Structure formats: C-alpha cells, structure tokens
Amino acid sequence: MRRKILFLIGLTLAGASLRAQELPDTKRKFYVNQTEFGILAGRVKYPNFYNGNQEQVDNKFSLTVQTFNGIQIDERFATGITVGMDWYKAALLNPVAVGFRYNLTKKSPVKLFATADVGYGFTWFHDDSEGFDTKGGLMINPGLGLKYGRKNGAAFTIAMTYKRQEARVNKPVLWDQTERSEERIYNRLALRLGMSF
C-alpha cells in the first residue's frame, strides 16, 4: 500500500513539474494537462434481500476526479495518460488509462472536443470489510466536451461522457458454499468541469 501511495505521489509531482512548452519551429505547446472533477450518475438494478429478492432500482450519484497528462501531437490531437479516482457507494476505484483528446472545431474560441480513455480501474485506496476482496477491471470512457479559452493557453472545460467500469467482489461464503462472488459493471453518465492548459 505504501508503494502505491508513493507511486501516485511521484506521478503527481512529475505532472506538476511539467509546463506547457513552446516548440521553436511551430510555436505550439508540447505538454497538455486537463484536470476535471464532477459526478457519475446512473440507475442501478439489484435484488433486495429484505423484500424476497425482488429487484429494486435506485438512482446513484458518485464523485469523480481525473487528470489527463499528454503530448500535443498536432494542432488538434493529443494523447497521454489519464489517472483518476471514482467514489462508488461500494468501491473506491482508481482508473489508469491511455487517453485521447481531439478538437473537432478549429478556429472557434469555444472548441468542441472528443475524448476517450481506455484502461483499468485499480483498488489502491479501497478498504474492504472483513472477508471481502474487491478487484477492479476494464474501464472505457468516451465522450464530448466544450473548451473555452485562449489558443494554446489555459481554458475551462465541460465534458459529458459515458463511463463503463468493471469490478469483481469476492465475498465470505455462506452455509455450504465453496465460493461466493459478485461481478459488477458500473454504467454511468459522467459530467465534469475542469481546466486545460
């Protein structure tokens, strides 16, 4: 656990030490950062053990934060690494993903951009109850957003994405069971605000 925390601190410090740089021949920035926070909204269907195992549907809202650190490939396309933290009701997951950002509009001061992250959600900071063992899984996060700000400078962002996160929970066995587990798939609409520079 200590190594994981030190690893995340190192990533944060490395990202903070990098700044937007100007390439001498093209006069465009080389390093890109997009840091966002927001909510994950969705509906969850699950069996209610206190109601004869009838399925029940509830609205769920969770917090999310993520930072994308990447390289500007050309004027419109950037690629890099996205690291985040998602607080679901029963799991605290840390997705690490390959990220892509692409400006769909070129000249406008308000830019429409596409975003996509594909990676794995880890359980580095999750703490299980006794007898439970939560594991992360595959994560995909495509969407669209708006960016308002100076060209090659700081900008405000708002993004709406679809987030799918897999997880697995091994549970304590009951009675004559030899194994007890639950496969979870978190399907959420993510609404995020942030800054890009």
Image (cartoon, grey):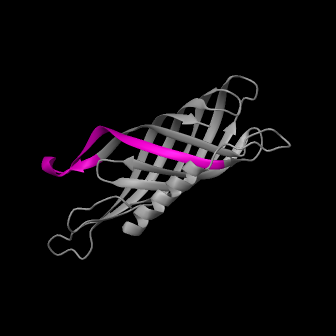
Q: Does the magenta portion include 171?
A: no
Residue farthest toward the top in the current orientation of the protein? 109
Percent across and percent down for residue 141 are 53, 46
Residue at (13%, 49%) from the top-left corner?
50
Look at the picture and state if 32 lies above or below 14.
above
Percent across and percent down for residue 130 are 20, 66
Question: Which is nearer the eye, 96 or 154?
Answer: 154
Residue at (65%, 34%) from the top-left corner?
113
Overall secondary structure of the magenta stretch?
strand
Q: Does the magenta portion include 48?
A: yes
Q: Quadrant of residue 111?
A: top right
Question: Which is nearer the eye, 93 or 37?
Answer: 37
Residue at (28%, 40%) from the top-left corner?
57
Residue at (64%, 38%) from the top-left corner?
114
Residue 117 visible here? no
Look at the picture and state if 20 lies above or below 9.
above
Residue 156 visible here? yes
Left or right: where 173 falls relative to 40: left
Left or right: where 88 falls relative to 160: left
Q: Find the magenta span and give its range.
A: 46-70
Left or right: where 90 falls relative to 153: left
How many numbered marks have been drawn onto this rendered protein structure?
0
